[in-house]
Amino acid sequence: MKMFATTSEIPSTKAILSTAASAAATAMLLRTVAKDYLPSELRHYIYDKVKNFFNSFSSELTFVIEEYDNLNDNHLFRAAELYLEPIIPPNLKRLKISLPKKESKVTVSLERNEEIIDTFNGVTLKWKFISREVRVKYIPSPDHYNSMPVTDHRFFELTFHNKHKDMVLDAYIKHVIQKSKEIKDKKKTLKLFTLGQDRMTGRRGDAWQSVNLEHPATFDTLAMDMDVKRVIMEDLERFVKRKEFYKRVGKAWKRGYLLFGPPGTGKSSLIAAMANYLKFDIYDLELTDLRTNSDLRRLLISTGNKSILVVEDIDCSIELQNRITEARALNARQGHGYVRDNQYQVTLSGLLNFVDGLWSSCGDERVIVFTTNHKEKLDPALLRPGRMDVHIHMSYCTPCGFKMLAFNYLGITEHPLFLEIEEMIEITKVTPAEIGEQLMKSEEPEVALRGLTEFLEHKGTEEEERKKRESDERIAKIEESGLAEAEGSQKQEMSNGFVEKKG
């Protein structure tokens, strides 16, 4: 019996290399044949089976994060895209860049089949982005009315040692989501939405159309009393932090504000400052453009979370002083079979349901702002807490507001004319818009302030004359009323035969 193999039975190096080359050539041939003659779906199926076979001997575990979950967006896929962007290594050779529509910043992302290594709590994790062509399928678009074709199957593979499965699910995924939110808020371009032209026609088009919100107003630049600004900012901060509180007490996570006061007192600027402070988009809703309460509900559910819904000049937008609008619309339908196009059909009850009813819960973290120049014209049902929680009086300019405007427009905090101007502002009804217009007339502080002084003097004179005219008219009416009353009394006495003759 042979104890050892002879030398002739040991393969030579040349034979080994020859066999390896033949195997490689065969593999390349099979790959070429598969690529040329097998459908892509079948190729991917075979590759996945082979990959799974070898993975069965590995200690690694892979999570697959697809772009869509059935027919819905997979928010974890979006979070992964944002999370990976800032940790892309500088030595990566292939990257995908894009400039989304209406955006000003370039977006950097992984090209297909590129990998990134991440470390969390001492654990190494590997991300890989994969994109494959598939047959066309249709996914609902963000406007909720149409579908968009999808021709790529896009997903991330997250690979790690299988002993860290619980840590990844419990801690790492939460870390990815939290970081992605911070990145999204930081890079977010605020939008100002208005009603789209085709929102109710059934044609393809968004319910809302948007432009970038580039209004520069902030709480630092608002010409308002410092205490009022502080109260508003604290209320907004408390609102965005109380998600669990609203859920616990059974209330929709929203906050209503009423801004009331004369025109030109900064209501629109305050709304822009709130949006810039919260990083919320603005939806500008014009109620007179809507035909029915159903239109209002459809628009409400198509607005995004973390947004400010604005209804300006609410007293002019809808008949809110009483509840007869519903009766008018009902009578028109019953009596004539139609309602005139120029008749407002968004009723008070419809608006109240939108603000504080069942439909108000369609969305989270929303601020609703109403503005009016005449608070007294609004129906009391709309003013109560839960509908308009915070009432903010936008008053005429104050000395504090003037100093802020002087700093914003002229870059100064002190001037010899300040005291005189502040004294006139305290006794003159002048709006921040009027003062700002005067300060814009010159970049020289002395010239601008002199012009403002003359404007305030002229306005003060006009107010005194107006008050005198109103006083004279009031006295004249009282005298006319007294004279008419005396004549009426005399006529009554004459008719009763009780005229007293004197002399």
Image (cartoon, rainbow, N blue to C red):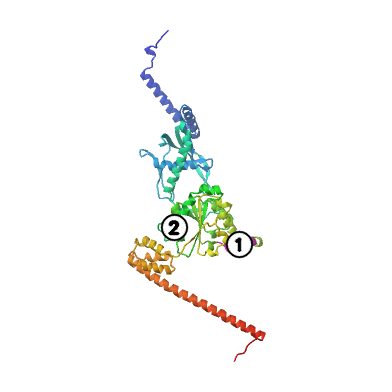
Quadrant where the image shows the N terminus: top left
Residue 287 point in image, percent of width and height? 54, 59
Badge 1 density bin: few <14, some 14–19, many ≥20, Cα 10 Å: few
Q: Earlier in the sequence, mark 1 or mark 2?
A: 2
Q: Amino acid at mark 2?
A: Lys
Q: Nearer the viewer, residue 288 or 461?
A: 461
| Residue 321 is a magenta residue | yes
Picture quarter with the C terminus: bottom right
Residue at 41% from the left image edge and 67% from the top image edge: 425
Q: Secondary structure at mark 2?
A: helix
What is the residue that sits farthest to the top in this orientation? 1
- Looking at the rendering, the stretch of residues picked out in magenta corresponds to 318-332
Q: Is residue 186 magenta?
A: no
Amino acid type at image mark 1: Arg
Secondary structure mostly seen in magenta is: helix
Residue 395 appears in the picture as rendered: yes
Location of residue 56 in the rendering, given as x and y in whole percent from the top left corner? 48, 27
Between 10 and 22, the one lying in front of the other is 10
Q: Which mark is residue 323?
A: 1
Q: Position of residue 228 (x, y in %)?
A: 45, 59
- Residues at marks 1 and 2, CA–CA distance in whole angstroms: 35 Å
- The foreground one among 422 and 379 is 422
451 left or right, relative to 205: left
Q: Which mark is residue 229?
A: 2
Q: Count the marks: how many?
A: 2
> SS for tag 1?
loop
Between circles 1 and 2, the one closer to the viewer is 2
Q: Is residue 29 above or below residue 140?
A: above
Looking at the image, residue 384 lies above or below residue 426: above
Q: Residue at x 61, y 62 (%)?
A: 323
Location of residue 317 (image quadrant): bottom right
For disc 2, the neighbor class at 10 Å (few under 14, some 14 to 19, many from 20) is some
